[in-house]
Amino acid sequence: MPSHLSSVPRARTDMTVRRSLPGALITALLGVAIAGCSPVTSGKNADVPKWRATALPSSPAGVVLQDSGKILNRDRIVQEAARVPAGSYTLTAVCDGTGKAFFAVSLDGKALTEAGAACNGRQETTKITLPTAGRVEISTSSVDAPLLYAYRLVPAQ
């Protein structure tokens, strides 16, 4: 014969589940509503010139190389400048989206350095020294596509 006490814990468990379900549902719906209101830059649909105007607004005199755009897959985007004099330079890079963008700098096909920028909309700078004059390439890539990126290489001040 079943005891009366064995059904009491089941009843309490069922009541506890029923009471917590509306609270969990409200919490989940609130989370979705807040996420829907947060400003997230979509790399696929973004207006790159408009974004660049705020992310990397001014172009100082003497820009050696600059680029901006969308990274939609893992393919590298390469830009080059011929006959860049030897000297000290500053690479300023920024990206927006999720993850990180990478900027590999080479001189006449030989790797010099790699810089990175966290995709939080903040500018990051890297000092670069070109030991000799030559052709400079900057290769931009990310494994966190889609995202927006912009960079410029200028002589160091």
Image: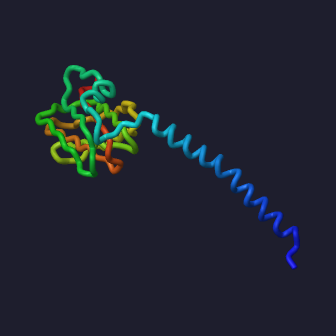
Q: In front here: 23 or 95?
A: 23
Q: Quadrant of residue 59?
A: top left
Which part of the image, by quadrant, shows the C terminus?
A: top left
Which part of the image, by quadrant, shows the N terminus?
A: bottom right
Please report the residue visible at 32 percent of the width from the left and 47 percent of the height from the top.
Answer: 145
Q: In front here: 47 or 94?
A: 47
Position of 115 relative to 64 (above/below): below
Q: Quadrant of residue 52?
A: top left
Please report the residue visible at 27 percent of the width from the left and 21 percent of the height from the top.
Answer: 58
Q: Residue furthest bottom?
A: 1
Q: In front here: 36 or 62?
A: 36
State the image coordinates of residue 147 (x, y, percent, origin top left).
32, 41
Count of numbered circles in the view? 0
State the image coordinates of residue 127 (x, y, percent, origin top left).
32, 33
Please report the residue visible at 21 percent of the width from the left and 44 percent of the height from the top.
Answer: 77
State the image coordinates of residue 104 (x, y, percent, origin top left).
27, 44
Left or right, residue 49 beside residue 147: left
Position of 74 relative to 94 (above/below): below
Q: How is the image coloured?
A: rainbow
Left or right, residue 48 beside residue 123: left
Please report the residue visible at 35 percent of the width from the left and 41 percent of the height from the top.
Answer: 116
Q: In front here: 11 or 157?
A: 11
State the image coordinates of residue 151 (x, y, percent, origin top left).
27, 33
